[in-house]
Structure formats: C-alpha cells, structure tokens
Image (cartoon, rainbow, N blue to C red):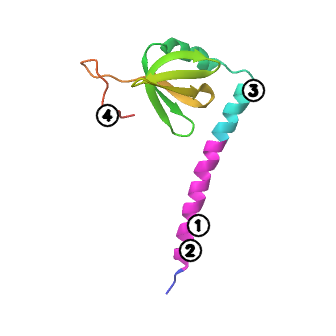
Amino acid sequence: MNTWWICFIPLMILFIILAQQRKETNKYIEAKIRRQKGDTEMQKLAVRFIGKDVMLNTVASGAYDGVMKEVVDNAVVLEKDGKETIVNLDYVIRLREYPTNKHGKRKSLIAD
C-alpha cells in the first residue's frame, strides 16, 4: 500500500503557508520603501475622512473601524466606544467610509 501521500500533504500545506507569509512580507517591504522615498499619498487621502465613520484594512489582513479624529505624522487616530486606536498609514491598504443601511445605521453584514 502506497503511503507516500501522507508525507506529501503536510509538505504542501507548509509550502502554501510559507508562500502566503512571503507575499505579506513583500507588501511590508514595498510599503517601507515607499515611506523612505517620501510617499504621502495615503496621508493626503486620509485627511478627507476626518470626522467620518471609517473602516481601514491593513497589510496584515487586519481591519480597524471607528470615527477618524485626526491624521498626524503618517498615523491615523480612530475613536470607537470611547477608546482611541492609532494606525500607521504605511500599512493601510484600503480606507473607506463604513457602509450604512437606509436608516443611516451601520450595516451588520458587509459583503465585499
């Protein structure tokens, strides 16, 4: 009976995980290079959203939401439930207003 596939499947899973981590590392390096060259495009765009309820997606697949209070030195201050969160704009991939339903309340389910 051939049992070679028992060793093959864990190796394939390991290679898939390593490939995903490598992609995230490359995104991080690209963001660092842009920052060193003086890229302030995301900072200029973020100023438009001050005072609005926003959702941020980051390189590491993190998502932050809250009301944007200020943009200072390539960082964003978000406030949600009385707590402040600071997010570095170098690692922000997507910035958008939080979707609302027809009554003006936050949507509970967001489909992208």
| Residue positioned most to the bottom | 1
Q: Which mark is residue 109?
A: 4
Residue 14 position, x and y percent, is 58, 61
Q: Please identify the residue farthest to the right as the structure is shown.
A: 37
**Residue 62 or residue 8, whichever sits in front:** 62
Q: Which residues are magenta?
A: 4-25
Nearest to the eye among marks 3 and 2: give it. 3
Q: Which residue is mark 3?
A: 36
- Identify which residue, 47 or 71, lies in the foreground: 71
Q: Which mark is residue 7?
A: 2
Residue at the spot 55% in from the left edge and 26% down from the top edge: 86
Total numbered circles: 4
Q: Please give the name of the residue rendered at 56% of the width and 29% of the height, measured from the top-left corner.
A: 92
User: Within 10 Å of the Cα at label 3, are there few (<14), some (14-19), or many (20+) other Cα atoms?
Assistant: few
- How far apart are the two marked residues, 1 and 4, measured between alpha carbons? 36 Å
Distance from disc 4 to disc 2, alpha carbons, whole Å, reads 40 Å
